[in-house]
Image (spheres, rainbow, N blue to C red):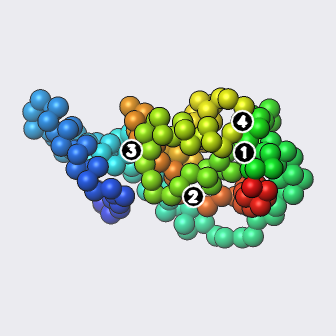
Amino acid sequence: MTRTALPFLAEDVSAVAKSLSKQLTDHKSSPSHVELLNMLARANGHRNYQHLKAQAAAHQRLEAAPSHPEIVDYRLVERAARHFNEDGRMIRWPAKTSHQELCLWALWSAIPQNERFSELDFNALLKRHHLFGDHAILRRSLCDGGLVSRTPDCRDYRRIERRPPANAIALIRRVRRAA
């Protein structure tokens, strides 16, 4: 059986150590090899070792994908921009899924990089960037859309660093310019 190297990058080593320490303390006996792999993965914000492995494989596939210029659908960007006011705040939740996805990218761009948020702080951040009073749908959609990760106990939220699609980049620029 051949083994491939699996990168393990921790943004906050102290948080990983605390989580691992707690998991080891809560474990009744000495953990097996697989249990220890799962603990390490969970300490770094993944569901389990398989999730960590799948994330790394997907990252490698995306990095290896040939790059080609993306075409911007300016009409779609224009329609999605209607969901933001002149201050760059979202004024309503779009009915169309294609508009929702673009609007979520605009919210994603407002989340500071490499910062972790408690659920309370993350809700406050979302409330500052929308006016329609449903931060829960935004939080859930950001997590479901793979733009924000959260721990299984929902105590820790952070932005997932990805390159937005061309349409999202155009919307982000338009919303920022308006603000």
In the image, residue 117 sits, relative to residue 1, either above or below, namely above
Question: Which residue occupies 18% across, 43% down?
Answer: 21
Q: Nearer the viewer, mark 3 or mark 1?
A: 1
Whether the residues at callouts 4 and 1 have beta carbons within 8 Å, the answer is yes
Looking at the image, tell me whether mark 4 or mark 1 is earlier in sequence order: 1
Q: Which mark is residue 131?
A: 4
Looking at the image, tell me whether mark 3 or mark 2 is earlier in sequence order: 3
* Residue 144, image x, y percentages: 57, 37
Q: Mark 2 falls on what kind of element? A: loop
Residue 11: quarter of image: bottom left
The Cα–Cα distance between marks 3 and 2, rounded to whole angstroms, is 17 Å
Looking at the image, tell me whether mark 4 or mark 2 is earlier in sequence order: 4
Q: Mark 4 falls on what kind of element? A: loop
Which amino acid type is shown beneath numbered disc 3? His
Q: Is residue 119 left or right of residue 75?
A: left
* Residue 177, image x, y percentages: 77, 61
The Cα–Cα distance between marks 3 and 1, rounded to whole angstroms, is 31 Å
Looking at the image, tell me whether mark 4 or mark 3 is earlier in sequence order: 3
The Cα–Cα distance between marks 4 and 1, rounded to whole angstroms, is 7 Å
Which residue is disc 2 drawn over?
162
* Residue 105, image x, y percentages: 67, 50
Q: Which mark is residue 89?
A: 1
